[in-house]
Image (spheres, rainbow, N blue to C red):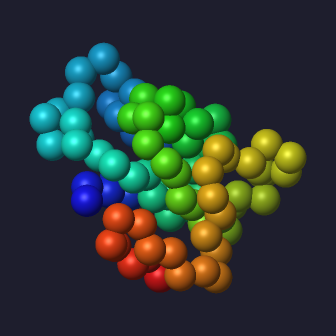
Amino acid sequence: MTVLAVGDEVDERLLGDSLPERLRGVRLLLSCGDLPADYLEALVDRFQVPLLYVRGNHDHRYGEATPPGDNIHGRIITVGGLRIL
């Protein structure tokens, strides 16, 4: 399974018109924190795959606008045979 892990810094290249070949097979987005909810939503729209995330130390800003996906803080998740701790 190909996982795109992101965290801390917005990378607009991931939302651009052309994607590197290695990103075409992404099956899961994993956010390691400190990214705006609207950016994560745009990534979900772009890649059309599920999002798992944990909040970072700056993610109190989410308030009511949480990212689309599952907050996996404190949980062990298995997706497609991959265990995420």
The outermost residue toward the left is 21
Is residue 57 found left or right of 24 in the rendered image? right
The quarter of the displayed image where residue 54 is located: bottom right
Seen as rendered, the residue at the extreme front is 80
Where residue 80 sits in the image (x, y, percent)?
35, 65
Name the residue: 39% across, 35% down: 47
Quarter placement of the N terminus: bottom left
User: Is 24 above or below relative to 5?
Assistant: above
The residue lying at 65 percent from left, 63 percent from top is: 71
Position of residue 23 relative to residue 5, above or below, is: above
Report the front residue among 48 and 17: 48
Q: Which residue is drawn at 22% across and 43% down?
A: 25
Q: Is residue 58 left or right of residue 5?
A: right
Coordinates of residue 38 in the picture (x, y in percent) = 64, 35
Residue 65 shown left or right of residue 35 in the figure: right
Q: Outermost residue toward the top?
A: 17
Tally of marks = 0
Compared across the picture, whether 6 is left or right of 59 comes to left
Q: Give x and y (percent) for residue 64.
A: 86, 46
Q: Can residue 12 be seen in this view?
A: no
Q: Residue at x 50, y 64 (%)?
A: 32
Is residue 28 or residue 62 the one in the foreground?
28
Residue 54 appears in the rendering: yes
Relative to the observer, which residue lies in front, 77 or 20?
77
| Residue 82 x, y percent position in the rendering | 34, 73
